[in-house]
Amino acid sequence: MTKLNKLPAPTFGWLGVNFAERKISDNTAEPVSISEGQTVRTDITADARYELTAQENKELTVIMYITGEDKRIDISAKAESGAKLTLVQVFDKGAFTASALSAEIGDSAQLSLVQLYIGGADTVSEIAPVLSGYGSTFKADIGYLLDGDSRLDINLAADHRGRKSTSEINVSGVLADISEKTFKGTIDFKNGASGAKGAEKEDVLLLGEKVRNKSVPLILCAEEDVEGSHGASIGRINDEHIFYMQSRGIPEDKIYELTARSKTDRIIKLIGDEETVSRINKSLGRSDDDE
Amino acid sequence: MKEKTQVSDIDRSLYDFRYEEDERDYLGSGITPEIIKEISEEKNDPEWMREFRLKSLEIYNKTPMVDWGPSIEELDVDNIVTYIRQKSRMNTDWNDVPDDIKDTFERLGIPQAERESLAGVGAQYDSELVYHNVRKEVAQSGVVYTDLESAMHDERYADMIKEHFMKLVPPTDHKFAALHGAVWSGGSFVYVPAGVHLDIPLQSYFRLNAKGAGQFEHTLIILEENSYLHFIEGCSAPKYYEAGLHAGCVELFVGKGASLRYSTIENWSKNMYNLNTKRAIVSEGGKIEWVSGSFGSHVSYLYPMSILNGKGARAEFTGITFAGEGQNLDTGAKIVHNAPDTSSYMNTKSISKSGGISTFRSSVTVNEKAVGSKSSVSCESLMLDKISRSDTIPAMDIRTDKCDIGHEAKIGRISDEAVFYLMSRGLSEEEAKAMIVRGFADNVSKELPLEYAVEMNNLIGLEMKGSIG
Amino acid sequence: MSELLRIEDLTAGAADKELLHGVTLSIGTGQTHVLMGPNGAGKSTLGCTLMGSPEYTITGGRIFFEGEDITDEPADKRAKRGIFLSFQNPIEIAGISLSEFLRNALEQITGKRMKLWDFKKKLKAAMELLEMDTAYADRDLNVGFSGGEKKKAEILQLLVLEPKLAILDETDSGLDVDAVKTVSKGIDEYKNRTGGSLLVITHNTKILEALNVDRTHILSAGKIAAEGGAELVDEVISGGFEKYIVGK
């Protein structure tokens, strides 16, 4: 067993959030480098390794559609100064997946990460961007839709080292049936990262008596001149919301349906790429034009 | 304007006064079954307690140190005198308290506070209760407020204590709970009968004085149905140079519809390891309110836990932590929702300065049974310079969909605009900053009785001195 | 004129406290009624109770709509019957756009899904009437809307959903003169186009200027203290509530 997704600052052991222990085998894939082209689509169904580089002042978008057997995915990404790297990852059902993303973001560079997790037997996902450059930016938009006995463990740690670096992390999702999710999100302001800002939000809709949700939003801070915030909201839709929507004629089950959909629609809208969106809709059993 | 924050040491002499020890008896350092037996003998423990102590020592020896939180490597428990017998015995009248001790308390303002509004004072000097007095009307209402050792030997309470003692915080909970079980000494026992509503707060001061002394007081409070109590625990300790340890234990049993407010201002001297365990269990419709200010100690691990065990039970936690030079204060709260329609509310502030480290750590657990529960957590941190550190480590574990859980946290510094605004009205920069910090801390100060709020504001003023270079 | 809404001896409250102590009131089809009263009289309680808010519990009396007893019906059923409440403090709903929300509501109420194009046209026309930036249609419902924009969004929903009875709970409060004019224009449009009934809860006359008030009710301490025609509104505005306050 290997300890994955280690919480940067461990807490009470009995909560079981300090790490995710799994049996993993070596990643057998040869590394694939992507540094050219504007939008690159790739399908991942087995072990994979990627080295992504957005070159100085250039833009690169990589879209990964992940399905298939037990696998490990290791990605090291780099946004050189002034570059904009967008990484879209759709984890669509499939088996055990251990994913690890490390990234380095240079001066005035940006990494945008868009992730959607749909079901899945067991996914352990590590996200470790280092905001080393002056004015570097990390944006993460993460959505999940878990049902059955799906398990998801996400460990995101935004490491602020550069001055005026900014991170913005938005997570929203739905847990149904007996699914289980742990989201650990850390904003880590290192000494010297003056003028840095970090904001993190998680919004979880629970739709099942036996779901299990763990949320662990950390802020670590060794710098005075920073602004950090996090917020989390977990549970059902509150009574006031329900009454308001009901008073316009929408029955309760429809209210839940609409709200649940809104959690993933946000991510789907961000993906934009028609081919990918169409695949997602197919997987979710929705028609492309649901108008 | 930004880089000026240069920090100088704070004059704590106002709070760090201490008298020379004289003929007090030390039982020697280190903990062996012999020591435990000696303590037990000295205290004339009932048989079950003697066994409990020995069993706890076994657990202590088997339990590993915590593997998270601030380092306690420098703490050598074996070298800390685990028990100091106080030369004076129980006193019922303030006039009989020895002069040096009295003077120390006088400087802390205890008798005055008592005259003004307090019901009773149970002050612990080193390990023994030296002064104890409950106002007549409190006693007449049926409220019992005494030291735990006496109560254990009183046939009216003996069974009650056996039934509750370390049931909420078992020695197996963690290493220092086990140590406490083995060497505990002194502390308070409060029993509030059903329906009794005590309007005036009960208060207890604990102090550490002897070099290398450990303090292991135990507080046991039982509230019967529909009763109300406000208990105030205040701590302050003078300066000395060997590592000191405080591993007290607080167990609170809140009955149906009862309400307990437990307020603490901790101001241990800055070489103390404060490894205190506090826990409350709340029955149907009951309420626990914690008000907690942590200013002193070298290292603190402090997370009062509320177990909401009855339908509609409620918990509120309001706290402030101020970590200055050489301090690593890891504080917060734990809430367990164990029954339907329970609710919890947590509001904390922390301040880091002069290289101090403050960590807010919390857990909110909502179990399957806790349908219809609500929880709201809000924590805010203030960094006063570039050499300090402030971490926020909350966790939520939710196991039912029928709940409403909210959490928010913020970290930042004093805004230059706010300082400028106050300075434009004639305040000095230091006054302006102190005022802003006091305002930041008002979640706690407005929950405290007036004389405590004043003391806390003075403490903040003292800590803020020398913050401008 | 047939009777649209009848409230019979309604008592209701929140958290063990009774706020309405036996209110009886009737509104005919196409009529405009005004409900006035001092702060804390129970006006909003009555409005919310008519809509079926779970915040308030009905402890006695009945509510009939078009002759049918709706006392125990949930809010969505009432909405389908044609009751609409313009909230005093509309809720912000993140993640769902105003247009998406309204299209779903319309589908639920009418039982059929309007073609996207037709819906957008209808929405756009209503937004233009209310002088709303059409970009609001794609924004999350009420999220980050100013107080005035929220009130306009309520009237926008009124225009799209076209209910039989609209309860306007202080729709004019907190609005500047121009915004009151715009909102009034929306209310007139609703009235002229659908001939629906109105129950207007208000403190002032501005919003009533273009309306033909059929009846005025003064609510005080949870009871109807006085009733009259349109003239009562002016009496209250000039003379205050003093003489209607129960116990004086």
Image: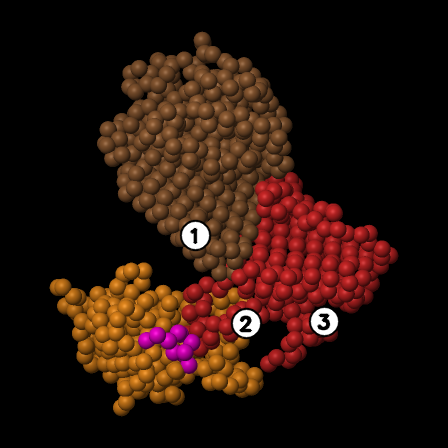
Chain colours: A red, B brown, C orange
- Amino acid type at image mark 2: Glu
- Amino acid type at image mark 1: Ser
Asked if one can make out residue B204 in the rendered structure from this viewpoint, the answer is no
Asked if one can make out residue B61 in the rendered structure from this viewpoint, the answer is yes
Identify the residue at horizontal 34%, vertical 78% (top origin).
Answer: C70
Both labels 3 and 2 in a single chain: yes
| Residue C77 drawn in magenta | yes
Query: Would residue B440 be found to the left or right of residue A60 on screen?
Result: left
Q: What stretch is highlighted in magenta?
A: C71-80
Residue that numbered label 3 is attached to: A276
Q: What element carries label 3?
A: helix
| Residue A76 drawn in magenta | no
- Amino acid type at image mark 3: Thr
Q: What element carries label 1?
A: strand
Give me the C-alpha separation between circle 3 and circle 2.
23 Å
Query: Would residue A95 be found to the left or right of residue B219 on screen?
Result: right
Residue B125 is tagged as: none
For disc 1, the chain is: B
Query: Would residue C244 be found to the left or right of residue C179 on screen?
Result: left
Sequence order check, earlier mark of 3 and 2: 2
User: Where is residue A23 drawn, in percent x and y?
Assistant: 75, 51
Give me the C-alpha separation between circle 3 and circle 1.
43 Å
Residue that numbered label 1 is attached to: B343
Quadrant for the C terminus of chain A, please: bottom right
Q: Viewer-proximal residue, B86 or C245?
A: B86
User: Where is residue B305 drawn, in percent x and y?
Assistant: 48, 41
Q: Viewer-proximal residue, B17 or B255?
A: B255
Q: How crowded is mark 2: few (under 14 residues within 10 Å), some or many (20 or more)?
A: few
